Amino acid sequence: MYKAKPTKQQLEWADMELGVLIHYCMEIYNPEFRAYKTAAVRTELPPSIMNPTKLDTDQWIAAAHAMGAKYAVLVANHCTGFSLWQTKVNDYSCASMSWKDGKGDILADFIKSCEKYGLKPGIYYSTGCNGYYDIGDSRAMDYKSDFYQEYVKNVEAQVKELWSEYGELFEIWFDGGVIPVEKGGPNLVPILQKYQPNAICFQGPKEYAHNVRWVGNEDGLAPENCWATTNNGEAAYDGTFDCEAAGVGDPDGKYWWPAETDMPNRTHKAFGGGWAWRAGEEKEVFTPEQLLDCYIRSVGRNSNLLMGMAISVDGDFQDTKQFEEFGKLIKETFGNPIVSVDGEKDRLTVDSVSLAVSVPTEINYISIMEDISDGHNIRQFDIFLDGELFYSGECVGHKRIIPVKGKKASHVLLKINKYVDMPTIRKFEIF
């Protein structure tokens, strides 16, 4: 059995567990226009149509903080190619907005708001498609053509701005991965290593040290066994993906590239698959109970949950109640364990650990946290309730939450049957 190990940055990322992906995009101002990955955006989606009256990044991040998010990623450049900062590369940006007479910088405001509320900031930048430059990810493209190489120069110039002018970033998001340099893609690793050597990269270049991968869907669902380790063909670093393999990973994988589970805060029936705002779609907002289920099936399956935030045409986030109630529900459900063992205090390097209460007690969830600093040691485990086998699993990783659905028990035993090296349990709790 091979055992890859995480970097310090990847360990910090796992402890964050919950983040947000903020979408304030051009498409919401002309929702009937669908060719936003083509040069038609220059006439159909001009920056002048963006003149929000309620844009307040503090309001965005306050909502994320209320939910319990520890980091926030702003979509600074989506498929239209419009830039939410004062880029010097082209004029399809904040500089051409009516808002603040073209002097505003949404990204700069976002960074300040993250600092104010204690969230780690991140930036999403689309390298795979850009309507302004007529680059579409669904069209056949000669990556080594003069046309595409001119686009590559612009990409490299813009990411240099993003990574060198806005301070330290926690996570950098490449939606769909990055075309490798040898195939004609942008040479991003030297820029990353120079300006953001500690940033986590979602679907980053395979040569980069601190990558995370896509879980394989946008439904808030990680597979039951979602290994943090994987191999090249399962990580989508090159702009392609295999959905099933992306989520599961490989317990003996060569790379420590854990899965991030991204989902919109509105259903896929809503505009832009739920990622983008449209008036009259309030009924498509997920309930707090639905989001808690996604939390259990992502954070509780060794993944981070990245919740979308659909910003309105006015520039505000209108689903604040959803986030507040979801955050409250997480605290109510997992804030006070019935009983727990804290391995971080006692260094529980064991192959079994038990919890006991004086009388049979109704249990809703069992939570296990493995010390993953030494990699995936646990490879198979059983849970016993009052001596009877209740659940068998394989992957624990950073956190595994097992629903029990109100079954009563007075004794809970975790028995680790297969492991690489003797595992260390960070926490073992019942709720």
Image (tube, rainbow, N blue to C red):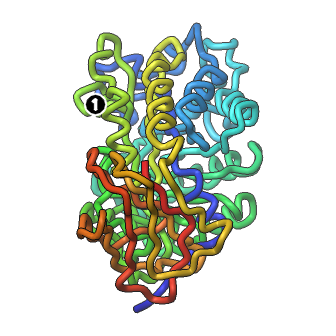
Position of the N terminus, as image quadrant, is bottom left
Residue placed under numbered mark 1 in the picture: 267
Q: In screen coordinates, is 174 left or right of 196?
A: left
Residue 287 position, x and y percent, is 33, 26
Looking at the image, residue 134 lies above or below residue 92 = below
Seen as rendered, the residue at the extreme top is 53
Q: Is residue 46 visible in the rendered structure shown here?
A: yes
Nearer to the camera, 278 or 100? 278
Q: In screen coordinates, is 158 left or right of 241?
A: right
Q: Is residue 184 visible in the rendered structure shown here?
A: no
Seen as rendered, the residue at the extreme bottom is 1
Label 1: how many Cα within 10 Å (few below 14, some 14–19, many 20+): some
Q: In screen coordinates, is 5 left or right of 131?
A: right
Nearer to the camera, 382 or 298? 382
Seen as rendered, the residue at the extreme front is 358
Nearer to the camera, 13 or 92? 13
Identify the residue at horizontal 29%, vertical 33% (top origin): 273
Q: Secondary structure at mark 1?
A: loop
Identify the residue at horizontal 52%, vertical 32% (top origin): 67
Residue 27 position, x and y percent, is 39, 25
Nearer to the camera, 270 or 287? 287
Looking at the image, residue 83 lies above or below residue 190 = above
Q: In screen coordinates, is 311 left or right of 373?
A: left
Identify the residue at horizontal 39%, vertical 68% (top origin): 235
Q: Amino acid at mark 1?
A: Thr
Identify the residue at horizontal 47%, vertical 77% (top origin): 376
Residue 275 position, x and y percent, is 38, 32
Name the image quarter holding residue 84: top right
